[in-house]
């Protein structure tokens, strides 16, 4: 929480807080009562209501996705001096990504409203089952997306459904795990960092590329390291070419030229060939990650603010801008600390080998380094820790699953499993949204409310 937020909370007397909450609850109750009264009851009204809702969701989703794509394309134009603002605009707002995203949301909204209201009229009941069935069937709308994106979306929504189930159980005092979100993030991240170095084919390709770019360790270095762990001898030419490609120092060339066929581990000179100093490398990593990721976090903070909080932005722009700026800095610091911490542990291990003639090296070192680095999560806002944990968990689960498949410990899922998982997840989420919204995360609640509205 920022200093501004703390100040605003503390200056409100207790009795005013109660009045404000009472007024807010009263307004919400009135809105809910009005929504119940206005629910369509005839076939014509249900169909019309569903079409309007679907079109509204399409326009919002298309606009949001187009806006994010446009801003990210602008960053590419600015950094690489490639393309133009016009092309960035056209690709962002009129590209297939935005269209698919809009069709997915619009189709889901249409089917959910149509089936949900239809079941309510047929059964003369408005309960969890209507939302469960309607959300599950409407889940077929994910077919509008590309397969690789469907998998990612299905993974994210499935863990959100699990979160809702956990929160429902927690509310009923069935179980409670202190700092469960942070613990989940730490364990999941350890697996992801292990896969990044030792099992790169078990994590999504786009996510792997993101990790390589963010960590700033040459892909060639990762490949050489993996080959050595598999018992394949080092090719000196590969090491020298790597150092040459990344404009390595004189010392890096010398080390690469004199490496044995089976070194204990890849030396620092191949991990950061352009810098001789490990300390300088760690500092450089930190600031480069901040420089690269801050615009992305800024986009993710400011675009939803403009889209969903336009009235509040007009009434009190300073507060929202300060909050979004602080969140951008905080999130960038978290990721930079994470990357720098991981790099420092790998360099420390290499220096122990170099200066103490250690012969110890293990593939599980990378799991441990990821585990330790993940404690940087405590820098992040507590409310975002759950979101980060649920973002990383599917990547870790996919890696575990693929490793087990490779070892023939488990069967492979059907090619349409992403649709089934998404449908099951949306059934649970929409049932909760309609009758137990408090078990959903604030982010999920806000997304559903703003994109789909009420039934």
Image (cartoon, rainbow, N blue to C red):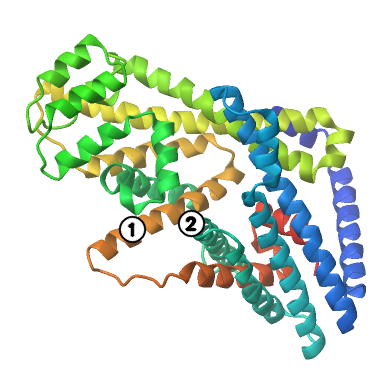
What residue would you read off at disc 2?
Answer: 148
Q: Residue at x 67, y 37 (%)?
A: 70
Mark 1 burial class by Cα count in 10 Å: few <14, some 14-19, many 20+: some
Q: Is residue 257 visible?
A: yes
| Residue 436 figure quarter | bottom right
**Closer to us: 89 or 248:** 89
What residue would you read off at disc 1?
Answer: 400
Q: Residue at x 53, y 60 (%)?
A: 150
The numbered disc on residue 61 is: none
Above or below residue 328? Residue 191 is below
Q: Is residue 139 left or right of residue 200?
A: right
Q: Residue furthest bottom?
A: 123
Look at the numbered disc 1 and give the secondary structure of its residue: helix
The picture places residue 370, in percent across and down from the top left corner, at 35, 40
Look at the numbered disc 2 and give the secondary structure of its residue: helix
Q: Residue at x 77, y 76 (%)?
A: 114
Q: Is residue 342 left or right of residue 321?
A: left
Mark 2 burial class by Cα count in 10 Å: few <14, some 14-19, many 20+: few
Label 2 to label 1, Cα distance in Å?
18 Å
* Placement of the C terminus among the 4 image quadrants: bottom right
The picture places residue 397, in percent across and down from the top left corner, at 40, 58
The picture places residue 213, in percent across and down from the top left corner, at 42, 33
| Residue 435 figure quarter | bottom right
């Amino acid at each position: 929480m920022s200093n501004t937020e703390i100040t605003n909370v503390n200056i409100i007397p207790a009795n005013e807080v109660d009045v404000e909450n009472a007024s807010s609850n009263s307004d919400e109750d009135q809105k809910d009562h009005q929504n119940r009264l206005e629910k369509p009851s005839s076939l014509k009204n249900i169909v019309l209501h569903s079409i309007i809702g679907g079109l509204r969701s399409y326009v919002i989703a298309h606009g949001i996705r187009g806006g994010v794509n446009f801003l990210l394309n602008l960053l590419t134009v600015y950094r690489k001096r490639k393309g133009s603002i016009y092309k960035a605009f056209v690709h962002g707002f009129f590209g297939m990504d935005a269209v698919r995203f809009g069709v997915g949301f619009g189709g889901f909204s249409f089917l959910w409203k149509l089936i949900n209201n239809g079941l309510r009229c047929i059964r003369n009941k408005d309960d969890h089952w209507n939302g469960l069935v309607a959300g599950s069937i409407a889940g077929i709308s994910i077919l509008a997306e590309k397969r690789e994106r469907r998998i990612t979306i299905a993974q994210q929504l499935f863990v959100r459904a699990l979160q809702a189930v956990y929160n429902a159980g927690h509310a009923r005092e069935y179980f409670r795990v202190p700092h469960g979100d942070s613990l989940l993030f730490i364990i999941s991240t350890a697996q992801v960092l292990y896969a990044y170095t030792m099992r790169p084919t078990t994590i999504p390709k786009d996510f792997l590329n993101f990790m390589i770019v963010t960590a700033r360790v040459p892909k060639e270095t990762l490949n050489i390291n993996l080959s050595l762990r598999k018992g394949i001898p080092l090719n000196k030419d590969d090491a020298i070419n790597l150092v040459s490609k990344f404009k390595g120092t004189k010392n890096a060339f010398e080390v690469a030229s004199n490496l044995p066929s089976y070194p204990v581990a890849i030396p620092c000179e191949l991990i950061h060939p352009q810098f001789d100093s490990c300390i300088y490398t760690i500092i450089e990593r930190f600031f480069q990650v901040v420089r690269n990721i801050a615009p992305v976090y800024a986009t993710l903070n400011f675009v939803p603010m403009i889209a969903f909080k336009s009235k509040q932005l007009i009434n009190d722009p300073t507060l929202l801008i300060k909050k979004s700026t602080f969140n951008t800095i905080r999130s960038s610091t978290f990721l930079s600390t994470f990357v720098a911490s991981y790099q420092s542990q790998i360099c420390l291990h290499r220096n122990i080998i170099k200066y103490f003639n250690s012969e110890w090296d293990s593939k599980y070192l990378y799991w441990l380094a990821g585990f330790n680095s993940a404690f940087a999560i405590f820098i992040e806002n507590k409310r975002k820790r759950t979101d980060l944990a649920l973002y990383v968990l599917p990547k870790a689960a996919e890696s575990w699953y693929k490793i087990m498949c490779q070892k023939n410990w488990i069967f492979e899922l059907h090619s349409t499993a992403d649709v089934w998982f998404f449908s099951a997840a949306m059934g649970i989420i929409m049932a909760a949204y309609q009758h137990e919204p408090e078990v959903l995360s604030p982010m999920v609640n806000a997304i559903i409310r703003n994109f789909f509205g009420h039934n």
